Amino acid sequence: MVGMLTFVLKKLLIGGAIGAALVGPEGEVLGQAGGADWDGAAPLIHKAASSWECLAGGPGTERYGGAIVEGAGGSLLVMPIEDGSVLAVLLGPGANQGRVRYEMKKNIELITSVV
Amino acid sequence: MTVILPEGTSLGTMQAPLTWVFSHTGKFVGKVAVQVQGGNGFLLIRKGEEIAYWFRYGKMVLRGSAAREYLLSQGVIELTLCRYTEEEFSIALEWCNGHGVQIAGSAHAMTPATGSEEPRVQTQVEPPQTQPPVRQVPAMLWSDDGIVMVGRCGAGGLEILAGMKPADLDERALCSSFGVARKLADTLGIGEISDFTLETRSGTYLVSEEDEGILCLIATPDVPFGRVRALLQRR
């Protein structure tokens, strides 16, 4: 599964994206591609996703559609996957967010099927 | 066929004087449901213009200016803004016609100021007075259609700057969301964050840091994401 997942995650490394990861429902890294400290970020992404779910209507009631963290040196795009996992893509400065978001949405089903 | 007053899309409930409606509905089209002293009713608003009033307490019904005067006399009342589509607004006007409720600008025979459900005396009632808009500067800045709320998270919790707080808003999650995003940015090395955006089915949340705290903007899902960001950036 990991090999296939890495292959799919690599498809997201376009338009200035420098790393992609799938974070599991327990905050573990299920798969990654590109360069980023996903092991350090995964528990935080998991915690953040729980907080965002509360904001979106409460755990288990309504999942958020996506989140974007904009920084001076890049940005992070996050999208939830059906089983409680979270897809995260790290973008460098000046990256094409729209294109990466499109690819993430386009490949969500594929990633879900691989997981 | 019985016409049912449309529910509309609720934008949230708040407690405020009726005058709040006059100064915060410049681009709103819909019903403002009201509850006070065990009675309930509504007023119809079209882009800041008061179109119709109806209020019921037990078997007593107030319509038009009588309902307006009563609600104005009540100080703080419970208000729920329910946005209407044009079709829903037309149905609501039809409901008003069918229930003898005066409609501003119409040439129809007007309704009794007070009475039971059944119309009794037909009298001419002056059109409702439109209050001049009295907007605070921040509210004016954010008074675009589709913006549900603008608030600031500070030491004292969430302070509403414009719009209304959604009834089911998790204030704690909202106010902590920026801190969580900041930690993530630190860990991934993307530097100091400028803003954080969350898309949900009920709306888009845009959170940004400013000198006096965390600024939060909530927009309806139909507002394009780019426009939400532009609004925040032009503040």
Image: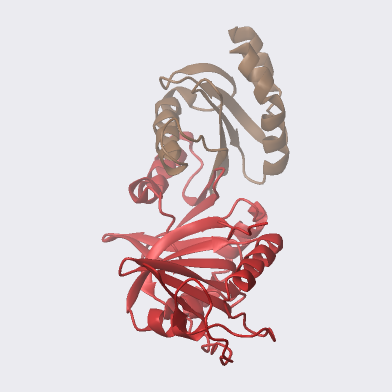
User: Residue A78, how many percent across, how many down?
Assistant: 55, 34
Chain drawn in red: B
Res. B217 in view: no
Colour convention of the picture? by chain
**Quadrant of the image occupied by residue B66:** bottom left
Residue at 68% of width from left, 83% of height from top? Answer: B106
Q: Is residue A51 visible?
A: yes
Q: Residue at x 64, y 19 (%)?
A: A111
Which residue is pictured at 40% across the width and 79% down the height?
B71
Q: How many marks?
A: 0
Q: Which chain is brown?
A: A
What percent of the width, then of the height, locates residue B205?
51, 51
Of the pair B217 and B208, the residue shown nearer to us: B217
Query: Residue B22: percent from the left, percent from the top?
Result: 50, 80
Q: Nearer the viewer, residue B15 or A103?
A: B15
| Residue at far left of view | B156
Choose between B195 and B13: the one closer to the eye. Answer: B13
**Quadrant occupied by the N terminus of chain B:** bottom right
Q: Quadrant of residue A89?
A: top right
Q: Quadrant of the C terminus of chain B?
A: bottom right
Location of residue B12 with respect to B130 vertically, above or below: above
Is A42 on the left or on the right of B82, as rendered? Answer: left
Q: Position of residue B79 (x, y in %)?
A: 42, 67
* B145 left or right, relative to A39: right
